[in-house]
Image: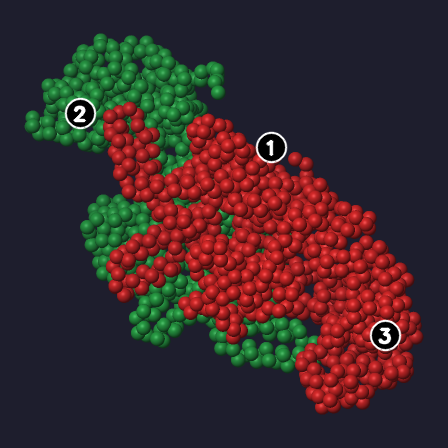
Chain colours: A red, B green
C-alpha cells in the first residue's frame, strides 16, 4: 500500500513549543521550550518528538520520512543563532543529545554530551575557549561517552585505561592530568574503539548526531527503561523525545560550574532553595559523585550574582509552574544557563508537606493540593522505617524484591511453630522460609517480618504480609535457606538461627544485625492529617477496611475506616489452636451431613404411620449413636465459641460502624495437610514397613485428602457451595455472628454486623443461605430477647453473578465485588499460575496494559461490574455496593469505583488513608458518576 | 401475615376439565376429562390439581384451605351420579385414587384401588355384585395395597402370608382360593397391619381417602420419582394431580376383563391396534404379569362387540388427539369403560416411522411430524445394538451407568497398551479399568468399548467414549478390577483377562460372552432419512461436526455434517507414536524458547556496531550449539510431519466443506507423566537406594513436572497463551495446516481449512497470533506457488472475550463459542470437581434447573453469548458464529443457538442427525431469531 501523505512535523525548535506539549516533546523538551518562551537563559536547541520515536520503531528502526531533513534544518537555525557550526574546524558547535519521555525516568535512558568533537573541532574548541586542556578533556570525555552509549562498548575498558594512565603518570585526580596526558588518553580511547568495533571512531559530526539519535531512541527499549516502566506502570508505547541542545560548559575554569537546585527540600518539603553545585565541572561530574559538591547556599559567597539570579528564576518557575521545581543549570564563564526544569521528585513526606503548605501559601488550591500527592506515597509515611544513620552503618546482606513495605528487625527463625512460640513470648523474630504456604500463617502472624528465597511481589508470603501490614522481602537471589542446618547462607555470608537480621520491605534490603526502627503514627503526621481531612470533605466514595482480627479493626479505625468491608472468617480458622478442630470438623463433615440428611428425610417422610415413626426412630438413633456425628458436632461447638469471641472483638472495635463478615470461603482441603506430603510419608512408611499403626493412620488421612482434593480448587467446592453442602457450618457461623451482636447490644453497644455470602452465581443459592441465616438469627434473638438489625448480601465474584445481578439483588441488601476472584474467572486466569507463567510476559509484550490483579481491568471486569450495578439497582434500588478485592487499595481502581458509582471501597487497614486520598482525587477529576 | 384470599379451586370434576388443562390436571386427569367431554364411556370421577399438591408441600404437608371440602363436594356428585355412597353399607361406592403428573412417569408414583372397602361395605359389595368371593378378594387386595402404599408396610409380609396360606390349603393359583379362604386371609392381613402400625386398619372410608391422597402427594417426592425426574430432566416443582375415580371391575366374572391398547405398534410404529387383554382381572394383574394376557386381536372372538367398540374409540381418539394413543380400559360385566388415554410412549424407531407415516396419511403436517420425534431418539436408531434374542439368552453380569450408548463385545483387557496392540491387530477388545485418565486414551481409541468401576455419566471415560462414539458402561457397583491378577470380579463371578464380555452402553448392561451386534446405517433407515430431509428444508442453523480424525470426518459427512466445527489437534498428540515427541518438545520448550528469545533480542539490538555484531554472533552460536534447542526443533519437525498428515486426511474427507482446526489448547503438563506417580517412584528409589541412575533421571523429570504443574490448570498456561509463550508451536501447527491445504489444492481438491485460536480473552492475543499464522501461511503459499483462502477466528470461552467481543471481532473472521469452558468460567465451576462434588446436589435441590454442562445455561452463559454476538457483529458484520461445546448436540441448547441467531452448531458426528432435527424443531417453534 503506497501512501502519499504530507510529511509530518517531527522536529520542534525550543521557541516553537511550550509546556502543554509534554506528550509530544517529552518533559525535558517541554520544559526547555517553556523556559525559552519565558525568556529565561536557555541554550539554543530543538526537540525530535516522541512521535518520531514511535514512527522509528514502527518502520523497523528507521528514521521516519523527513525527520533527518527537519533535524538538519533545525540544526541550521541553532548554528545561525550561536554563530557556530557542527563539525566546523574554526567555530565548532557542540551539542548534547538528550533523551526525555513524557514521564521522568531518571537515569533510565541515554544522553550524549559534547557531540561534534573530533580531531578538527578539537582545535576550534581549544581556540574558542582559549583552553587547550579543556578541549582535550572534553574530547576524551566525548569518546568515552559516545563509545559506551552509542557504540555499545563496555565502560570498564575506558576506566581501566584511564586509571592505568593516571597511575603511570602519578596523577591522583583527573585534574592532575595535563593537556599532554589528556591528548595521549584520547588516543588510547580511540584505539579502544578501533579495536572493539573494528572501525575508526566516527569523525563526521553529522554521522555522530545520526548515531546518537538512534542510540537515544534505542534506549527507550533498553532493559533498564523497560523494567522501570513495568515497575511504575508507564505504558511502553509512549516513546522518548530527543533533545539536541547547544553545549554550554561548566568546566571552562573557576568562573564556571554546574549544579542542580530545588525550590523546596525534596526530602522534607521545607520551603527553601535546596541543591548542589560543583565548580569547574560538567553535569556528569555531579551525577558521578566523584567530587563532593557544595551546598547551593555556599554559592552566595562564591558567585553571589548568579546565586541571586537562580533564586529569582527558581521563585519565578515555581510560581509559573505552581509546583516545586527541580532545575539543572550551568554557569559558563560567569553566564548562567538553565538546562532543565521539571516538577521536582520528592519523598512521600515532602510531597505531603509541600502540598499542604502550598495550599496554605495560596500558591495552589486545596483541590490541587489533594492531587499533588500520589496516594500510594501515604503508605510510606506510615510504615516503620530504619533511621538513615543506622542504615548507612549496617552491613547490607542482600537485596530482594520489596514485597511488602515497612522495616523490622528480629531473630532469624525457620520454623513457623518456633516463630509463633517466640513471638508470643514477646520476642521479635523474622521468619525465614524458602517460600511460604498457608501452613506457615500462624508463624507469620507472630513474626515481625518475613524473608523468603523464592516468590515475587505476588507470592503467598507477599500477599499475606501485605494483608498483615508486615514487611516482607521475597525472591532474594542466592539466598540458600537450610532449616535442617539451622542457618541460611547469602553470597558467602552464613547467618545462624537466632542471629539478628533487619529487613526493609520498602527497599527490599536485608541487613545483618538489629537496626532501630521508628513507627510513625497517623495522628503525629499533622500535614497528612490535614490533607486527609480535606480529602474526606471531597470524596464521594466510602472507605472501609478489610480486617480479620480485632487488632486490625482497631488500626483501621485509627486510619479513618468507616467500617469493615470484608472480614474473612477463614483466617481465624488457620490459627494454631483452632486448626485441629477445623480439621476434625472437615474430616467428619461428609459422613455426618449424610446421616443428618437421612434423618431429615425420615422426618419429612413421617406421615403419622407407625412404620414411618419407626423409620424416624431408627434414623434418630443412628445419628445419636454415630461417633462421627458426635465429633462433627463437638468440633463445631468449639469453633462456635472461638468465632463468637472473634466477632465480638471486631464488632466492639468497630462499634457503631458496619462490619461485613464473609462466611467460610476456601475449599476445605486447604485446611488439611498437603496431599503430596502425605503421599511421601505413606510411601516411605509402606517401604520401611516399620510402623504399621502410623501407616494405617496416614493411609486413612491420605485417602480422605485424596477424596477432597480438586483438579481446580479455585473453581471447586468453596464459597457458598460449602454452606449449601454442609449446612451446619453456615449455621455455626450465623449463630456466632448473631450471638456476638446480641451480646454487645445487651451491653449497650451499637454493633452493626452484616453477613456476606461468597461466590454466589445463582440467585437461589443466596435465597437458601439467607433463609438459613435468618432462621438461626431469629433463634438467637429470641434467646437474647433483643432485636439485632442484620443486612445480608453477597459477593459478586463470578461472571454469572454479574450478568444475573437483577435476580440476585432480590435477595441481597448489598453487593461486594470480589475483584480478585472476578478477575480470575473473567479472564480465565488462575492467579497462582498466571503471574508466574505468562502474565508478566503479557504485560511486557503489551498484550495487557497492566497486571489485572493489581489494576482493575476496566474493559472486562469493569464492564461486568457496571452491568451488575445497573441490573442490581434496577431490581433493588436500596442495594449498597462496594469492592473488597485487593483493588480496593489501588488508586486507579478506586477511580474506577468512583466513576462506576459504587458506594465504597474496602482496603487493607494500611491502605485506608491511601484510599481516602485516591477517592478524593477521583472526585476532583470530575469524571461522570452515575446517580443511584 | 394473615391473608383473606378467596379459596382457590383445587378440585375439578371430569366434566369440568379438558385436554388443555394438562399442567393443572396432569396427563391422566386431562385425558379422562377430554374423554368425558367426548361422551366416551368414562367412570365418574374428579381430579385434585397439581397446584393443590404444590400448596400441600408449601404448607408443610398440609392440605391447602378448602381442598378437603371441595373433595367432599366432588365426591358427593359422584355419589349422586352412581347412586352409591362411599362407606355406605348397602350401596357402597369404591374409588381408585391415582397419581398423574403433567408428564408421564410410568410406575414411579402410587395408586390405590378399591378404596372404600371395610368390614361393612364388604357386605354391600357382595350383595350388589351378587358375588361374595369377588368382594372378599377385593377386600384382601385393598388391605394389601393400602397397607403397602399408604401405611408404608413392606410388600413381603403380605406375600409370604398369602403364599403360606395357599400352601396350607393346597391352592396352586389365587383363583383356587375359596371365599372362606379369602375371608381368613383378609383377617390375617388386618393382623399384619395391626402388628406393624400398632393401630387397627382404618375402617373409615373417608379417612382412607384422606390418607390415600396424602400418600399420592408423598409419592411425588418418593425416591423413585425424584430419580426419574432427574434422569429425564423433568422439573421437581410441577407436582402431581390426584384422580379419584369410581371403581369399575374387570374381575366380576367371565364377562369382565381389563386391558391396554395402542393405536399403533409402540415398538415398530406399524399402524394397527396393538395391545393386551386379561379376562376376569383387575388392572394390577396385567401390570403384575402373573397371568399371561391375550393379544388384543383375540378379543374379536371372545367379546366381538367390545372389540369393535375399542377399535372405533381408538380410531376416534387418534384422530382427535392427532397422535398415537395408549389406552387403558376395563369391561365390567360386558360394559366397556375407558380409564385412560394418553399419547403413547414409543421406541425411537416407532416414533420416526409414526411421524413420517402420519404425515403421509395427512393426519399431521410435516412440520408436526418433525416435532413428534425427540431429537435424542435418533441417536438410538443409529447405534450398534444387541439383538433381543441374544440379549435374552445371555448371562447378565451387572448393570452400571449407561455412560455412552451403543453395544460392543470383545475380549477383556486391562492395560491400555495391550488394548491398543490387540485393537490394531484387528481384535475386538473391551478396555476394563477402575477409571480412566488421559494416559489411557490410546487404548480407548482402539477398544470397542469401555467398562469402568468408578465414575458416572460425566467421568473421563464417559466423556471420551461419547466423543469417540464408543459404548461405555461406567460406575458399576461391586465391580472389582484387579489388573495385577488379570481378572475382574463382579457379584461373585470372576472374569479373566482375554475372556469375552459384551456391554450395552444404552442400557448400562454387562453380559458374559460375545453377543452379536447389528450396526444400522443412516442410509438404510428410510423413514429417518426422509425425516431429516424434511428437517434440512426447515432449519436455519448450519450443522457441523466435531471431528479430530479423518475417520470421524468421514462419518460426519455420512451423517449430514456441513463441515467440521472443531478439530482438536491435541487429541492427535496423545497417540502413542507421537507422545514421546510431544514430551520431548515440552521438556525442552522453555529453555529453547529462552535461548531463541535472547537471539531475537540480539538481532533486534544489532545496530551495525561491531560490539552488537559480536553479541549477535555469540547468541547465534549459543542457539546453534544448544542440545536443548536441537531436541526442541527435532521434536517439532516430527510433529510437523504427523500433523500435516492429520490435516491432509481431514481436509480430504471434508473436501469442499469448511474445517475449523483449533490450535493446541490443553496445558502442556497434561502430556507428561502424573506428578503423584513420579513422586511415589522417586520416594521409593530414594529409600531403596538401589538404582542411582534411575533416581537421577526420575528426579529430573519430577522437577520438570513440578515446575510445570499448576494450582488450577483449567485457568493456567493453556489455549492461546501457549502459543504466545512458545511461538514455535503455533508456527509448526500453522505450517502443517497450510501445507496440507496447499498440497490438496495442487491435487485439484477444494480444501477449506480455517484456523481457530483458543481461549482468547484480550484482543491483542488474537492479533498477535493471527499475524504469526499469516506470516507462516505466506511462506508456505510461496513455497507451493498457490493461494489458499484461510479464515482465522477465535473461540469465545472466557467471559472477558464475550464482553470485549467488539475488540476481538476486529481480528476475527469467526467466533466459535466454546460453551464447555465458557460454562466453567461463567459459573466459576471446574467441571471435574463440580459434577462429583455439588452439581448433582444443586440440581436435586432445585438450585439449578439442569446440569449446565449438559443444557446450556441461558440466564448466564446464554446472556454472554448474546452479548458477544451483538458486540461482534457491530464491529464486524461478516463475522460467522457457532458453538462447538458439548451443548452443540443438546436439543435445548440448539434451540437457544437458533434463537440467539448463531449460524451453526457443531456436534460430535453421532449427534449430527440429532442436531439437524433439533435445529428444525427450533425453527418450527417459531421463536424470534435476530437478523444479521
Which residue is drawn at the image coordinates 29% and 62% (left, top)?
A685
Viewer-proximal residue, B564 or A763? Answer: A763
The residue that disc 1 covers is: A878
| Tags 2 and 1 both on a single chain | no
Relative to A551, residue B91 above or below: above
> Mark 3, residues whose alpha carbon is within 10 Å: few (<14), some, or many (≥20)?
many
Mark 2 against mark 1, which lies toward the viewer?
A: 1
- What is the spatial separation of the Cα atoms under label 2 and label 3, in whole angstroms? 120 Å
Which residue is drawn at the image coordinates 73% and 50% (left, top)?
A371
| Tags 2 and 3 both on a single chain | no
SS type, badge 2: helix
- What x and y, as percent, mark residue A918? 67, 48
- What is the spatial separation of the Cα atoms under label 1 and label 3, in whole angstroms? 71 Å
Viewer-proximal residue, A633 or B830? Answer: A633
Q: Quadrant of residue A123?
A: bottom right
Q: Disc 1 sits on a residue from what chain? A: A
Return the mark for residue A256: 3
Left of B274 or right of it: where is A849? right
Q: Disc 2 sits on a residue from what chain? A: B
Relative to B153, residue B601 above or below: below
The residue that disc 2 covers is: B195
SS type, badge 3: loop
Relative to A66, residue B834 above or below: above
Which residue is drawn at the image coordinates 30% and 43% (left, top)?
A628
The quarter of the picture where the C terminus of chain A appears is top right
The quarter of the picture where the N terminus of chain A appears is bottom right
Amino acid at each position: 500500500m503506497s501512501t502519499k501523505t504530507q510529511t509530518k512535523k517531527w522536529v520542534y525548535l525550543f521557541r516553537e513549543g511550550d509546556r502543554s506539549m509534554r506528550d509530544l516533546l517529552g518533559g525535558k523538551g517541554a520544559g526547555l521550550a517553556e523556559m525559552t518562551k519565558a525568556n529565561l537563559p536557555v541554550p539554543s536547541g530543538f526537540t525530535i518528538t516522541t512521535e518520531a520515536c514511535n514512527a522509528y520503531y514502527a518502520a523497523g528502526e528507521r528514521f521516519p520520512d523527513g525527520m533527518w531533513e527537519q533535524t538538519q534544518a533545525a540544526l541550521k537555525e541553532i548554528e545561525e543563532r550561536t554563530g557556530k557550526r557542527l563539525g566546523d574546524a574554526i567555530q565548532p558547535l557542540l551539542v548534547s543529545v538528550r533523551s526525555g519521555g513524557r514521564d521522568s525516568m531518571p537515569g533510565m535512558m541515554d544522553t550524549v554530551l559534547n557531540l561534534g568533537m573530533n580531531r578538527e573541532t578539537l582545535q576550534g574548541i581549544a581556540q574558542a575557549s582559549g583552553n587547550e586542556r579543556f578541549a582535550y578533556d572534553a574530547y576524551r570525555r566525548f569518546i568515552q561517552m559516545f563509545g559506551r552509549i552509542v557504540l555499545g562498548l563496555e565502560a570498564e575498558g575506558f576506566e581501566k585505561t584511564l586509571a592505568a594512565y593516571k597511575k603511570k603518570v602519578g596523577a591522583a585526580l583527573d585534574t592532575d592530568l595535563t593537556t599532554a596526558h589528556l591528548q595521549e588518553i584520547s588516543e588510547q580511547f580511540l584505539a579502544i574503539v578501533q579495536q572493539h568495533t573494528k572501525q575508526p571512531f566516527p569523525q563526521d559530526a553529522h554521522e555522530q548526531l545520526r548515531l546518537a539519535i538512534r542510540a537515544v531512541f534505542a534506549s527507550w527499549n533498553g532493559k533498564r527503561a523497560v523494567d522501570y516502566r513495568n515497575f511504575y506502570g508507564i505504558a511502553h508505547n509512549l516513546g522518548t523525545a530527543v533533545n539536541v541542545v547547544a553545549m554550554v560548559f561548566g568546566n571552562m575554569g573557576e568562573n564556571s560550574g554546574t549544579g542542580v537546585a530545588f525550590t523546596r527540600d525534596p526530602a522534607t518539603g521545607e520551603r527553601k532553595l535546596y541543591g548542589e553545585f560543583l565548580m569547574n565541572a560538567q553535569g556528569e561530574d555531579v551525577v558521578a559523585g566523584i567530587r563532593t559538591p557544595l551546598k547551593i547556599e555556599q554559592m552566595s559567597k562564591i558567585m553571589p550574582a548568579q546565586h541571586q539570579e537562580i533564586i529569582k528564576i527558581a521563585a519565578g518557575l515555581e510560581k509559573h509552574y505552581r509546583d516545586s521545581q527541580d532545575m539543572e543549570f550551568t554557569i559558563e564563564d560567569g553566564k548562567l544557563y538553565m538546562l532543565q526544569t521539571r516538577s521536582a521528585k520528592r519523598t512521600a513526606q515532602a510531597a505531603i508537606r509541600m502540598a499542604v503548605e502550598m495550599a496554605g501559601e495560596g500558591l495552589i488550591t486545596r483541590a490541587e493540593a489533594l492531587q499533588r500527592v500520589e496516594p500510594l506515597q501515604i503508605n510510606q509515611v506510615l510504615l516503620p522505617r530504619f533511621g538513615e544513620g543506622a542504615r548507612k552503618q549496617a552491613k547490607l546482606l542482600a537485596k530482594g524484591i520489596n514485597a511488602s513495605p515497612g522495616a523490622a528487625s528480629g531473630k532469624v527463625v525457620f520454623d513457623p511453630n518456633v516463630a509463633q512460640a517466640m513471638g508470643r513470648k514477646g520476642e521479635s523474630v523474622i521468619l525465614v522460609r524458602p517460600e511460604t504456604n498457608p501452613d506457615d500463617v500462624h508463624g507469620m502472624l507472630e513474626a515481625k517480618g518475613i524473608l523468603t528465597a523464592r516468590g515475587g511481589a505476588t507470592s503467598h508470603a507477599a500477599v499475606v504480609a501485605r494483608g498483615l501490614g508486615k514487611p516482607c522481602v521475597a525472591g532474594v537471589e542466592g539466598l540458600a535457606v537450610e532449616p535442617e542446618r539451622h542457618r541460611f547462607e547469602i553470597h558467602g555470608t552464613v547467618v545462624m538461627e537466632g542471629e539478628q537480621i533487619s529487613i526493609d520491605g520498602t527497599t527490599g534490603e536485608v541487613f545483618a544485625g538489629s537496626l532501630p526502627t521508628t513507627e510513625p503514627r497517623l495522628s503525629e503526621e499533622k500535614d497528612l492529617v490535614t490533607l486527609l481531612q480535606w480529602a474526606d470533605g471531597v470524596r464521594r466514595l466510602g472507605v472501609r477496611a478489610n480486617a480479620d482480627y480485632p487488632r486490625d479493626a482497631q488500626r483501621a479505625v485509627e486510619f479513618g475506616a468507616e467500617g469493615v468491608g470484608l472480614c474473612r472468617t477463614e483466617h481465624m480458622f488457620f490459627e494454631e489452636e483452632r486448626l485441629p478442630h477445623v480439621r476434625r470438623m472437615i474430616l467428619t463433615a461428609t459422613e455426618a451431613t449424610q446421616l443428618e440428611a437421612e434423618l431429615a428425610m425420615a422426618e419429612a417422610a413421617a406421615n403419622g404411620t407407625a412404620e414411618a415413626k419407626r423409620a424416624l426412630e431408627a434414623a434418630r438413633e443412628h445419628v445419636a449413636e454415630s461417633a462421627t456425628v458426635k465429633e462433627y458436632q463437638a468440633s463445631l461447638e468449639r469453633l462456635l465459641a472461638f468465632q463468637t469471641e472473634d466477632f465480638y472483638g471486631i464488632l466492639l472495635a468497630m462499634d457503631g460502624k458496619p462490619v461485613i463478615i464473609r462466611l467460610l470461603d476456601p475449599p476445605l482441603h486447604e485446611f488439611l495437610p498437603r496431599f503430596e506430603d502425605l503421599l511421601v510419608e505413606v510411601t516411605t512408611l509402606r517401604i520401611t514397613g516399620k510402623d504399621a499403626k502410623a501407616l494405617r493412620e496416614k493411609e486413612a488421612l491420605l485417602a480422605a485428602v485424596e477424596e477432597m482434593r480438586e483438579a481446580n480448587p479455585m473453581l471447586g467446592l468453596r464459597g457458598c457451595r460449602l454452606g449449601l453442602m454442609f449446612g451446619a457450618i453456615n449455621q455455626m457461623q450465623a449463630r456466632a455472628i448473631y450471638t456476638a451482636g446480641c451480646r454487645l447490644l445487651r451491653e449497650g453497644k451499637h454493633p452493626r454486623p452484616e453477613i456476606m455470602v461468597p461466590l454466589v452465581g445463582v440467585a437461589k443459592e443466596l435465597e437458601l443461605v439467607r433463609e438459613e441465616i435468618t432462621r438461626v438469627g431469629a433463634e438467637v434473638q429470641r434467646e437474647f430477647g433483643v432485636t439485632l438489625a442484620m443486612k445480608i448480601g453477597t459477593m459478586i465474584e463470578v461472571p454469572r453473578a454479574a450478568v444475573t445481578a437483577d435476580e440476585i439483588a432480590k435477595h441481597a441488601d448489598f453487593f461486594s465485588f470480589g475483584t480478585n476472584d472476578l478477575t480470575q474467572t473473567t479472564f480465565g486466569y488462575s492467579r497462582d499460575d498466571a503471574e508466574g507463567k505468562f502474565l508478566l510476559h503479557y504485560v511486557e509484550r503489551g498484550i495487557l496494559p497492566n497486571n489485572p490483579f493489581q489494576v482493575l481491568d476496566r474493559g472486562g471486569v469493569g464492564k461486568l461490574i457496571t452491568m451488575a450495578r445497573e441490573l442490581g439497582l434496577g431490581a433493588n434500588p436500596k442495594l449498597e455496593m462496594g469492592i473488597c478485592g485487593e483493588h480496593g487499595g489501588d488508586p486507579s481502581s478506586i477511580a474506577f469505583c468512583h466513576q462506576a458509582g459504587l458506594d465504597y471501597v474496602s482496603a487493607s487497614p494500611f491502605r485506608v488513608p491511601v484510599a481516602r486520598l485516591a477517592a478524593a482525587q477521583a472526585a476532583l477529576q470530575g469524571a461522570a458518576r452515575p446517580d443511584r
